[in-house]
Amino acid sequence: MAEATAGYKVIGTRPLRPDGADKVTGRAVYGGDVRMTGMLHGKILRSPHAHARIKSIDTSRAEALPGVKAVMTAQDLPEPEDRMAAAGEVAVNLKYLACNVMARDKVLYKGHAVAAVAATSIHIAEEAMGLIEVEYEVLPPVMDVLEAMQDDAPILHDDLKMMEFGQQTDKHGNIANHFQFKLGEPAEGFKEADVIIERELNTATVHQGYIEPHNATVLWNEDGHVNIWTSTQGQFVVQKQTSEVLGIPVSDVTVTPCEIGGGFGGKIPVYLEPVAAILSKKSGKPVKLIMSRIEEFDATGPTPGSNMWIKIGAKNDGKVVAAEAVLKFEAGAYPGSPVTAAAMCIFAPYAFPNMQVDGYDVVLNKPKTAAYRAPGATNAAYAAETLMDELAERLGMDPLELRQINGTKEGERQVTGVAFPRIGYMETVHAALEHEHYATPLTGPNRGRGVASGFWFNVGFQSSVVINVNSDGTVNLIEGSTDIGGTRASIAMQAAEALEIPYEDVKPRVVNTDSIGYTDVTGGSRTTFATGYAAHDAALDVIAQMKGRCAGRWNSEEAPVTADDVDYSGGTFINKKNAEQTMSFKEVAGTLARTGGPLTGSATVQPRGVGGAFATHVVDVEVDPDTGKVQILRYTATQDVGTAIHPSYVEGQIQGGAVQGIGWALNEEFIYNDDGNMVNASFLDYRMPTSLDLPMIDTVLIEVPNPGHPYGVRGVGEVPIVPPPAALANAIYRAIGKRMTNLPMSPSAILNKINNGD
Amino acid sequence: MHAFDYVAAQTVQEAVSLLAEKGDAARVLAGGTDLIVQVREGRRSPDLIIDVKHIPDTNVLSYSPQSGLTLGAAVPCHRIYGDATIAAAYPGLVDAFSLVGGMQIQGRGTVGGNLCNSSPAADTIPALIAHSAVAVIAGPSGTREVAVEDFCTGPGRNVLQNGELLVSLKIPAPATGFGACYLRFIPRNEMDIAVVGTGSSVVLSADGSTIISALVALGAVGPTPITVDTSALAGQPANEVTINTAAEASIAAASPISDMRGTVEQRRHLSGVLTRRTLQKAIARAQGEA
Amino acid sequence: MSQKQMVTTTINGEETTFICEPRQSLLEVLREDLGLTGTKEGCSNGNCGACSVILDGVLVDSCLVLAVETAGRTVGTIEGVAGPAALHPLQQKFLEHAALQCGICTPGLIISAKALLEKNPHPTEHEARLWLAGNLCRCTGYDKIIRAVLDAAETMGASA
């Protein structure tokens, strides 16, 4: 096993994850594996039209099919109020949420749910789908963000009026929001520039591509309590959103998180739970709903396609004097694209003196977008990092050197005006510059090397942890963070470090909404940070209480001892006033009944000291000039990881995120026909990288501890997806001599550029 | 999924009479890697699925240098290239058979099924055409043979009449001086449907310098696989000039459409590129290089 | 209504009999009727490998096999990989190398890798990547998976 990081006993080692045996043997229970007595299987009927009014729904023939036990439509849900509901990482509008779960008057994308059935077998449920008659008035769809912004575009919502610069306007259309971030005076700044570059870039809709489809099993019990088993990134979000859509108190809903087969942000919104709940209520049985892969593409939230205009001006010495961008993002059928996050991240690696970013959130007839790993930032970096590359070339400068000249540091202001705390951007650039990869010349025809940087702000939010001490000196760590990527281990390691006991003695358990205090989603790169923070604090609570127990044991009239007189180090409690009085952690644990009874430590956190994450990636490619196909020869990702609690899982986050970025860059996109139907809704033609498409992904973990966390943790999971598309675009440029300004940079696009483009 | 009955036919006659009786309501099941997906997605709704994997005739896999290769229609791809002798004798076929999906697909998918599915983008068909393969078909009126290059009649359509079953494929023994190669273009490195596929073969003179005959077949650039007219190559030197002539002929013969997998321009261009590359390799193989 | 069929097959070395409709895939019967939920469903059209099993010694996608086709055959699933008291070297190496994050692709990958090593006990990195191309993983980027497989090959080769 690896050595611990200097100054630590557990942190930095690479122990086996506690849920490991279950996961490699197939024993672990994912949402789709849940079985209950009398369980029915549900299917959702979905709109074949991208935009239509629902004239009528007749479910009578489906209800009459033997084996069908319940049918539901939006009429079975309460009329949703037009107000905000807290829901994960961002607040959501309840009306939009409820209508997305089940369409009320209009369908706004192909795949929009219109009805559902529960039957004794999945096959009968599928047959029942064909017996539900829905009358639609088909409307023209709008499928492109620029078209959706036109005055004559088909309008999705009768009541959507644009917010502009924080004020509600009267402009009725598809633009939900227009905001602007500004620092300094870009117009003035550009006047000082020796070189100005501007470009327009576009990205296509892409999906998180988690291998496990959405699922939910719900029992609406006879006592009125709703029990939900689901694969989710946040059981408390499911609880809240489901209760809101159903119009019942939150306390009537218990959500048990099953193991989850990938999320990346896509398993935060609720799609199935309210539907299964109504079907369960009507049938009196538990109901399970699982999405098919086609439904995943048609009806769950992808990340937005976007149109971006960007302009950067610099002096000949490389100092950028002004930068401007206009980001137009597709929100999907309901408002709420991550365009704001994109605007926060686009210039974040740089201390530009004058910056302005305008963002537009635009609805159109595609599924409502959901978070996808650093949502918005990858689109933004594609634009900014391409231009920085072009700028470096224009100035005759190494692209990493240009970033050193402009790179941001602690104290510099972002476009939002907020100053950075201690961060590690410059360290990532330095690491890339010094890396053997960068020092190795890339030779051969049709080859190129590209670099790009990226940023993600990470979040803190709320977590709760309880630690129960067992009589044998082990502890049960009760937490509410679903474990998507090894966080049971990273949280247990932090508890073990704080308790000064072996990692193996900490038994983490992920529990349901009844059994632990409120805990926000596993997402936003917050879990190791915030839940680890709570575990650390809960551990300190345990130690403090144990000191009290020791004091109680040692206290006497002749020699009084209070908890303040007790020290704890390396697993041993010692009476500072009498060094012969010691007890080990295990001994204290073994005598709890004699010293006051069971011992439970707890903590709740809402940490403010979130550390943002920076990354710089280097990639070598070879492009086949006859086919446009890109082969990745070598990939190196450097990142400031704060403190790497479990380095293997930190490396894994970097590698996994980088590969998602590679897929986004080279092949992934939603392809729509003129009717607004996605034509490549399967893993055959929605092409995610396979093991044969990639080399090893080398990672460099730079540790610039985050002062806002007891162990220096920074979120690491999201920023790795941000640089790859730009890094690849820059590498492809050096291979073929032309800039790709649209994602994906598929072989046909590259071939077209080689043969026809500029 | 549509409800169907299942029967495992034990003989060719049994399969033929069931097919004749049921007509379009029955489908043959070999590897299932196309059929099961089609039924699940509602593109086909058979009432009866006839499993032909238990019929001895469809499981034949035999080769001799004199009589060539007999490939039962239900033999899965992995069995074919798993046979060292056959793999060594037909590298140009192994090229194609080892590309049909990933390892899991090759564990089940059959060449016979790939041919009968008759997708314009099928990987095995251009390679079979380049090897002058012949389809052996059994039907109510007896057995007949059809050259594979004549087998497909349109996207998903072929010459099989009501009641007919593809029993096996016959591939001639490679002549002296024969070399073949199949390549396809896909956006990833595996798991994709061919954007363009090309199967080429040559028969060279004894000294390897001249092309006696050549076959070039293109996939995914027309409603059926296209056999390019390569008569102009006969007697030509086996060099780059001749190869380029063949590439031009392929570009002219291709009649692709634009769809989500490729554009017309891209497919035409790739027809030339892959013709060039497969002929280069076929010639190298004919000349004795690996 | 189609005729249900009684099927007797051998799963992980145990003779097993079940009744199913012809339209039920092996994947569905394993998960729904036999309680063997270790084999996962990701796409239902043979493009992700999460449902990989071994059928008569051959690696296949169980979503593309009808359950009725397994009569008289042998099926190997993830539940049969570990020994009675110990994990298979592949499983152990996956854990040591952190070759899983969410774990949903892991059963399919271990089945595929097991089939690979039975056929080719000393694969190169390229051979391993080619063989495993039919198993999608969205979390790891494959780096640690390949390392785990190659390490397991060494371990198994050393003790052979």
Image: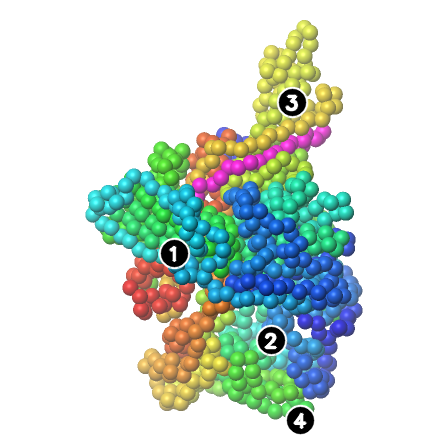
Chain identifier of the residue bearing label 2 in the image:
B
**Horizontal and vertical percent position of residue A522:** 56, 43
Q: Give the residue number, with chain letter if any, for mark 4.
A: B141
For the residues labelled 4 and 2, the Cα–Cα distance comes to: 25 Å
Chain identifier of the residue bearing label 3 in the image:
A
**Horizontal and vertical percent position of residue B49:** 69, 77
Residue C51 is left or right of residue A367, and the answer is: right
Q: Give the residue number, with chain letter if any, for mark 3.
A: A546
Q: Between residue B207 and residue A137, name the one nearer to us.
A: A137
Q: Give the residue number, with chain letter if any, for mark 2.
A: B110
For the residues labelled 2 and 1, the Cα–Cα distance comes to: 45 Å
Q: How is the image coloured?
A: rainbow
Q: Between residue B211 and residue A385, name the one nearer to us.
A: A385
Where disc 3 sits, the SS reads helix
**Horizontal and vertical percent position of residue B222:** 46, 80
User: Looking at the figure, which quarter contains the N terminus of chain A?
Assistant: top right
Chain identifier of the residue bearing label 1 in the image:
A
Residue type at mark 1: give it.
Answer: Asn
Residue A93 forms part of the magenta stretch? no
User: Looking at the figure, which quarter contains the C terminus of chain A?
Assistant: bottom left
Q: Give the residue number, with chain letter if any, for mark 1.
A: A307
Tell me which segment is drawn in magenta: A454-475
**Horizontal and vertical percent position of residue A458:** 47, 41
Are there few (<14), some (14-19), or many (20+) residues within 10 Å of tag 4?
Answer: few
- Where A473 falls versus C89 (above or below)? above
CB within 8 Å, label 2 to label 3: no
The verdict on a common chain for dots 3 and 4 is no
For the residues labelled 1 and 4, the Cα–Cα distance comes to: 63 Å
Q: Earlier in the sequence, mark 4 or mark 2?
A: 2
Residue type at mark 4: give it.
Answer: Ser
